[in-house]
Image: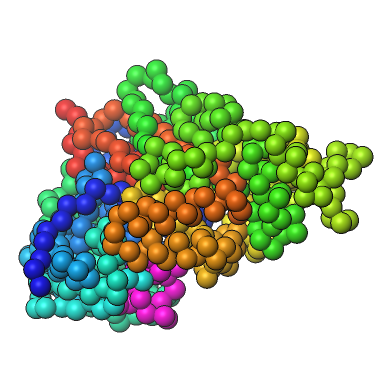
Amino acid sequence: MKARSIRVPAAAALATALSLGAAACSNPGSGAAGNGTKDSAVVGIAYEPDSLSPLLGYGKDGNSKIFDGLLTFDDEMQLGPALAAELPKVADDGRTYTYTLRQGVKFSDGKPFTSKDVVFTYRTILDKKTNNASKTELDAIKDVKAAGDHTVVFTLKYPYAPFAERTVLPIAPEHIAGKQDVNTGAFTTRPVGTGPYVLTNWSKGEKLSLKSNPGYWGGEPKVKKFTMAIIKDDDVRATRLRTGDLDGAILPPNLAKTFKDEAGRKSYAAKSFDYRTVTLPTHNKVAGDTAVRRALDVAVDRQAMVDQILEGAGKPAYGPVPTDSPWFAKGTERKHDLNAAKKILDEAGWKPGKDGIRVKDGVTAAFPLWYLSGDKLRQDHALAYASDAKKAGIDIRTQAGTWEVIMPRMKHDAVLAGGGAPGDPDFDQYSLLQSTLAGDGFNNMAQYDNPAVDKALKDGRRSGEPAERKAAYDTVQRELVKNPGYTFLTHIDHLYVVDDKWTGLSTQIEPHDHGLASGPWWNVEDWTPKK
């Protein structure tokens, strides 16, 4: 078959799966930050991964620092080669991708990287025994084979248009990970990769400590020590940055602006696909009612949230796709209309009681809404949403908790959730809305079940024709107007403040999972200390 090379404009994708929150750290810098040292950096982030194994999902969208994928994204979110020597050759039917690998690459333990490691990584992830919640992202793969030490051939079941973007997934060493239990082995917390940094310590709930890899194929980074401090609470993160314990941090708008005019610091704003949404569980008698869902969808004042909570650093969200994306279905915007919300509820038989809260067939229009403790943005969104709902006669009771508390309640209780994946619409919508994924961890948290959406998601995933795919995802978005299993609130710009010690900092278009793999430190291996 004739082959063609590709260049794909894209952005890193993440499943809607939410990272577990971590406890506030204790002195993560250990003196490294704030002392003028330029060959080390300590940054504050809000979440940490469950595992550091790419076989279980870590770094699946790139920028893992410890690992490399076959391909990588640059600052403009264009795909380029990493462990592959060049972009893949794609057969005319779109079902065969051939990768030629970079030669001379070694894992940080000195062992050579070969095609066997690539085959091992993908086959292990797809194995039913592997606890990787994102394996449906690789559903298109029929087989992956090595053709010698430096060539890998993927055969697909169908022409999955964004497949190349999936191959930013990090490659694990077969000689280490292949000799352990994939789900519980030491590799999950003590990984070995080919990346620019090597893990030196992971104090769970506190920090991830990395040092530069002197044998990195791209050249040893000039920032020799890099620490990601896990600080769940926004206020604590800001305080640690202000006192010099951190060199940089991700912050909500109200805290980021307090650093605006500080000498020696720079602020960065990254556009993102990151949204905040309220899950409306299908199994809740109130939140699962279509009329209630539709009423809430127009009762909420999204623009007020952008103006007051985000202070303009974002835009209203009507679904997982931002309004400025070419994949957005025009005409699916929902205006704030409290009277329309009341009319929907009246016609559906939800009548106001003496206290103004609506009742239908003896059921009160009330349900709890959980948000993550310490996350001010989620708290503010939750309170604003509950306030808007109350005006329509729906009593939403906000409660804070850790994910350990929230997860067992997700089937019946609403959650102020986050998600968002730049690039192809399949990356986010499939895991968010596909009914077969209901109850699978953070996938389809609302347990949304809509046959028309299921069909459109599969059509969009399996078609290689752009027009057919656009029509499929338009269908998904229009179905969400008819029966919104989630109330999408805002798309959020990510704000960062970093000490002005280095050059080479930039931002990408970011997914929901920000701070860990994104932020101005997405390319910390390319930073150069200022003289």
Residue at left 35%, top 31%? 268
In this rendered view, identify the residue nearer to me: 407 or 156. Answer: 156
Is 132 one of the magenta-colored residues? Answer: yes
Front-lying residue, 271 or 186: 271
Residue found 40% across the figure and 50% down from its top:
421
Q: Give the percent coordinates (x, y) of residue 132.
A: 42, 70
The colouring scheme, among rainbow, by chain, secondary structure or one colour, is rainbow
Q: Which residues are magenta?
A: 122-138
State which quadrant residue 324 falls in: top left
Image location (x, y in percent) of residue 263: 35, 19
Q: Quadrant of residue 154?
A: bottom left
Give the quadrant of the C terminus. Answer: top left
Q: Quadrant of residue 96?
A: bottom left
- In the rendered image, the residue lying farthest to the right is 354
Looking at the rendered image, the quarter that the N terminus falls into is bottom left
Count of number-bearing discs: 0
Asked if residue 319 is positioned above or below residue 267 in the image, the reply reads below
Image side of residue 388 versus residue 143, left or right: right
Asked if residue 299 is positioned above or below residue 169 in the image, the reply reads above
Horizontally, residue 311 falls left or right of residue 399, namely left
In front: 343, or 181? 343
Tell me what residue is drawn at x 75 percent, y 51 percent: 367
Residue 249 visible within the image: no
Residue 166 at what x, y percent from top left? Answer: 29, 61
Q: Is residue 391 visible?
A: yes
Q: Position of residue 159 (x, y in %)?
A: 27, 67
Work out whether 161 lies above or below 311. below
What residue do we see at 68% from left, 54% from top?
290
Front-most of residues 482 and 107: 482
In the visual, does 101 lie left or right of 56? Answer: left
